[in-house]
Image: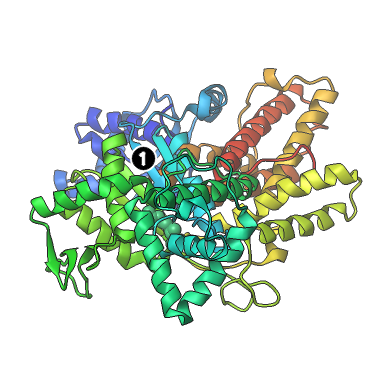
Amino acid sequence: MKKLLELLSEEMGQAFEAAGYDAALGKVGLSNRPDLCEFQCNGAMAGAKQYHKAPIMIANEVAAKLGGSEAFEEVNAVAPGFLNLKLKKEYLPKLLEVMAKEPKFGLEKPEKIKKLVIDYGGANVAKPLHVGHLRSAVIGGCVKRMNRYVGHEVIGDAHLGDWGLQMGLVIAGLKERYPDWVYFDESYEGEYPEIAPFDISELEEIYPASSKRSKSDAEYKAKAMEATYKFQQGVRGYWALGQMIREVSIKDLKKVYTTLNCEFDLWNGESTIKDLIPEMVQYMKDGGYAYISDGALVVDVKEETDTKEMPPCMILKSDGASLYNTTDLATIMDRVQKFNPDRIIYLTDKRQDLYFQQVFRCARKTKLVKPEVELDWIGFGTVNGQDGKPFKTRDGGVMRLERLIQDTEDEMYRKIREGREMSEEEARKVANQVALAALIYGDLSNQASKDYIFDMDRFTSFEGDTGPYILYTIVRIKSILAKYAEQGGDASAAKLGMAQSDSEKALVMQLLQFHSMMEGAAAELAPHRVCAYVYELANDFNRFYHETKILTEEDEAKKAGWIALLSLVKDVMLDCISVLGFEAPEKM
Ligand code: ARG
């Protein structure tokens, strides 16, 4: 369905045209003076210059053309030339009917369906997810679902960190412990074991130990670098071991990501495009883009207008080793070959700003992507503790993401058990759902680029701009609908009525903003807009609910109309939270 303002602008445009003016002047917007009218059009003011006429004259002429209008009950031309508009009572209910009936509330397909690749998650193999990974997973997942919702084709890729020195450190650590493993026998030509000879806890122990040792032990560091090199060159045993490390890590990462409702279509990594690197390097040399500087292969990405330092993008180090840039650029090549995307979106912590500028410039300059391909980077802020510093455990350690999720769940469980009659089992289940909402909403309701303070007390509160408040509102509506059914009402047959009170009108108007909100949020990659919308909708509903005795209303048609309205509010809220990445319980 067309969006409300589009419909109104269309009708207004026709009136401008009929009066002899440009139809584009008929742009209708929400009123600045809701006390006077619901909508307004300032086209007569805008057209005055063009037509050398007093705006009020234009406004009067246009108003006269709107006599038999489908939408407008009253059109008042007021000095100096505004058009104040009031809708016919039956107009909005008709639009709501369409919303209630159509899939996705009548959201129109995008003019051009785009293919998007979203690179998010940011996990590194052999390392546990920590609190910093929450944002990439949660924001990236939401950006993916928003864009799917509005009709684009979206591929989500985990793009694991499985390439650099960290691989060599883990492999070197394993080699120290198990020098006899067949992986390290370079003359071995047989198959490698199918089952990994280590588990995730061993990897998580080896990595930091190995990393620490490499900082003080130069000989060991050299071994780790050699292991990295062999792995990157694809030396059989090293490569096979690397794949095992990936496999074991992915299995473990999936567990945590699943608890966050975060799933990926692709579990590719930096190493996935290993075989494309030589081709890409050759391409960059052949195109005359890359040159040798101090032994390294680089591409200049400086532009004349730069005011800041912009170092060249390094493709290969002087020893021929490849880096983070190399894999990112080759991954762009791979994505273009495989998916030919219209847009690629990356999520990382905002400190990678300069890095992504370099990579994007390099990709454009070397024509790895066509000029029309959009490359976006969402740099997110830090999750801080109450002290304003990066969130830590109580004893100052790095907060594992699993721990944070568990702590939130425990806190939610405590709150739910307090003063509620619920079995232990149910309370656990509900706590799990609500905690997820608390975490996800707490994160997404902030603009991505801003740092935020992880405030357990506030995030898990049932009041205010929080996930639990949103769920509470949905559960409240569900319970009213259930009571209506108990009274013998049939909500599916209920017909939407005309909004009477101000609070009801506000609620209706909010519902009708859904389409433009969702399209805007998806295009701008802005999950916080969905949060702001669902919060406003919840507030509008609660205001209406406190003013209106719904279930005891004697006029059955009126009651049924409200029930239909509530159903729609609930359904819109449910779609919003599913896009955000959480679900509502039946009760809480
Ligand atoms: N693994 C990286 C990190 O820990 C983030 C990866 C982001 N994606 C990318 N294509 N560079 O910082």
How many numbered circles does the render carry? Answer: 1
Q: For the C terminus, give its image quadrant.
A: top right
Q: Position of residue 418 (x, y in %)?
A: 88, 56
Tell me which corner region of the image, top left, top right, bottom left or bottom right, holds residue 401.
bottom right
Q: Amino acid at mark 1?
A: Leu
In this rendering, position of residue 43 left or right of residue 548: left
Q: Residue placed at 11% from the left, 68% from the top?
A: 304
Compared with 534, 214 (above or below) is below
Reading the image, the residue beneath label 1 is 116
Q: As rendered, which of 339 and 126 lies closer to the eye?
A: 126
In this rendering, position of residue 576 left or right of residue 171: right
Q: As rendered, which of 84 and 162 lies closer to the eye?
A: 162
Q: Position of residue 53 (x, y in %)?
A: 18, 45
Q: For the N terminus, give its image quadrant.
A: top left
Look at the image and tell me whether residue 218 can be seen.
Answer: yes
Q: Residue placed at 50% from the left, 49% from the top?
A: 246
Compared with 205, 93 (above or below) is above
In this rendering, position of residue 407 left or right of residue 389: right
> Is ligand 1 less than 8 Å from the beta carbon at label 1?
no
